[in-house]
Amino acid sequence: MKDMLLLTPPFTQLNTPYPATAYLKGFLKTKHVDAFQMDLGIEVILELFSKKTFRRLFDIAFETDAIVSENCERIYALKEHYLQPLDEVIRFFQGKNPTFARQICTDNFLPRSSRFDQLDDMDWAFGSMGMQDKAKHIATLYLEDLSDFIIECIDDNFGFSRYAERLGQSANSFDEIYAQLQMPTTFIDDITLKILDGRLKLEQPKLVCVSVPFPGNLYSAFRCAQYIKANYPEIKIAMGGGFPNTELRSVSDVRVFEFFDFITLDDGELPIELVRSNVLDPTPENLDYRLFKRTFLMEKGEVTYNNTSARADYKQAEVGTPDYSDLFLKDYISVIEIANPMHSLWSDGRWNKLTMAHGCYWGKCTFCDISLDYIKIYQPVAAKLLVNRMEQLIAQTGETGFHFVDEAAPPALMKAMAFEIIKRKITVTWWANIRFEKNFTRDLCLLLKASGCIAISGGLEVASDRLLKLIEKGVTVEQVAQVTRNLTEANIMVHSYLMYGYPTQTVQETVDSLEMVRQLFEMGILQSGFWHQFALTAHSPIGLNPSEYGITPHYNDITFANNDVDFKDKTGIDHSKFSFGLKKSLFNFMHGIGFDMPLQDWFDFKIPKTQIKSDLIQAYLAPEFNFDIKPSAKIIWLGGMPLITEQVKTKRGITRQQLTLSFHDITESFNITMEKEEGEWLLNFLEQLMPDKEKQLTFSHLKKDFETRFEDFELFWFSKPIKVLKDHGLLVL
């Protein structure tokens, strides 16, 4: 029995739990509060995609004459072929049956319907050695065939990572969701509520906290709350998470509170602590009685916003380490939807999710909800504490993969974290989202790679310097090109978010942006990308000051959700018509093809010729030699100590003693030869320059020490032997 149940409703991700409840459970642990958490999404998926359940689905579809399309007729005709391997396919996705990959990869094992029509080039995508990934991709298409059958014949609201998402998107009124909730429960609802009921009976909570991160979780959240109210009226229910934080800041419809007793905004720790205090002890003797933090509730028949508690929110150092206990970590399923290495990171593998900092250190992008606390209030976590949390999560989950879900991870903190990881000699794999800013130098990227960074995503957005300035992104296309080059050369995969349709963007700028993107892929410094059309949100600088950006918003009466806003751009351009061509060209560029095709060929309407020079990105990447090193720059040696050979050379009567230093790194061996005294000086310092030392030495420290014995440190520093070391792990940070 637990007083609290923390619940994520269907559906978010198949491969890893959404971290909100784990964060909350970790915080409650610091308060000695024991709560149970569950991810209903994965539990429902596992029940739904089982041989036993899917046999019932086939029967229902046949009995109700729901099978209409040729595709579903084919699936039904092959139902025994779909049913027989289903349980084993799920076990394979869970990593419990890896040898099954060989069977899946044979051409005539899994049945194939429409999802296989666009099957990627397997040899390009996975090569001859990527059998596990190839099998995951094939099995994912098989699973998506079955999901198409569900959508057509059973429940058109179904989606693997969302459910009834349409109902939650821009739902300014609660009417449509409320009407849907008066309808009979669906087949998927029944599975969801049966699993929920079993947990409620077992834990007997007094408070259920429902995390709703996305619109695709909203309908199920209300269905769960409706069921609890009908069957366990004594239980109080709270809603929090990403969706209410952005969409429900002005909720006023009293019908919402037929389902939920509380809706909390922004950081959840203190609001939930106060809600729990009021639920468990609703008496005037309780010091928190009727005091809440950023919480909507019903009072005297009206929706009220209660923010009466004077207590300050918890600092990041006080919220504890996320706690993933209770979740079925070994049962999540890793799929590969499309044959793209970056996209697979989102759906393949179990990642422990962490944040390096609360909020965004930049906090200026005009399309972003920077007025809201979750972005506006920036508070980093100390590197040592961050790595402590990583080690605690590794011990708890057995997983060494980390996805940092920051809006934009701060470079200084990434550097400090990388040092700490290397210093502790722990082996981890991690990826994060960044701004492509100039601080991501070649050497910093090499340090990040050495600490376990495998991939980076970041916003190039509109790929136009005029528009990037208007966005206040704080970067230029040239800067982005140089940073993506630095990351790529460090063997860190790069994914870029791309935007079209930004206010005042012209057709010419859209075409030129595509040309920039084409060149970035052709140069091999972008490996993945995704185009999305600009969306106006109510809490962004553009939404708050639309006239400054040349747009006219169309506001609706708001009684429920308020975030996305319809608008008209003064240019009058229909940007949506570019969607297909932009995405088709990008798909080809990611496959390494189509670079020589005229941009016009991607569109079925006339576009202007690009005004971007064909070698612009190449020019941006021209090597620059930086002779100006900050005295405070830290000097790090990532390599090992060399083997030493001493030799004496006599030339024209002059005898010179030299040292040959033989180094071995993971991929190769190399030698450098130096004058003996300089070589001995270098050897003395190399060990001190290793990143596991408590104190890192600076450029000025080395220069000062060198010049007590020799002349002209700069001449030594820019010599050929030191350049060789710089190519193999001597870093300036």
Image (cartoon, grey):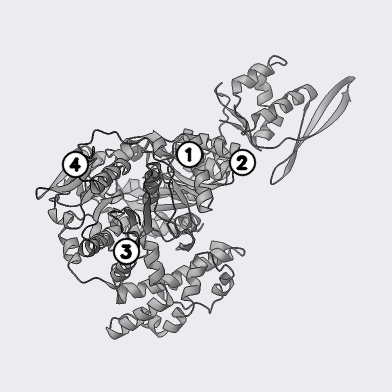
| Residue at the extreme top of the image, as rendered | 708
The CA distance from mark 4 to mark 1 is 35 Å
Compare residues 378 and 706 and report the one nearer the observer.
378
Q: Within 10 Å of the Cα at label 2, are there few (<14), some (14-19), or many (20+) other Cα atoms?
A: few
Pick whichever of labels 4 and 1 is earlier in the sequence.
4
Pick whichever of labels 4 and 2 is earlier in the sequence.
4
Q: For the point 64% across and 16% down, which residue is it?
A: 704
Can the viewer see residue 371 in this picture? yes
Q: For the point 12% across and 50% down, which residue is it?
A: 557
Q: Where is residue 407 shown, x and y percent of the image?
A: 38, 42
Q: For the point 45% across and 63% down, which residue is it?
A: 337
Pick whichever of labels 3 and 4 is earlier in the sequence.
3
Q: Within 10 Å of the Cα at label 4, are there few (<14), some (14-19), or many (20+) other Cα atoms?
A: some
The numbered disc on residue 290 is 4
Question: Mark 3 is on which residue type?
Answer: Lys
Q: For the point 56% across and 24% down, which residue is it?
A: 629
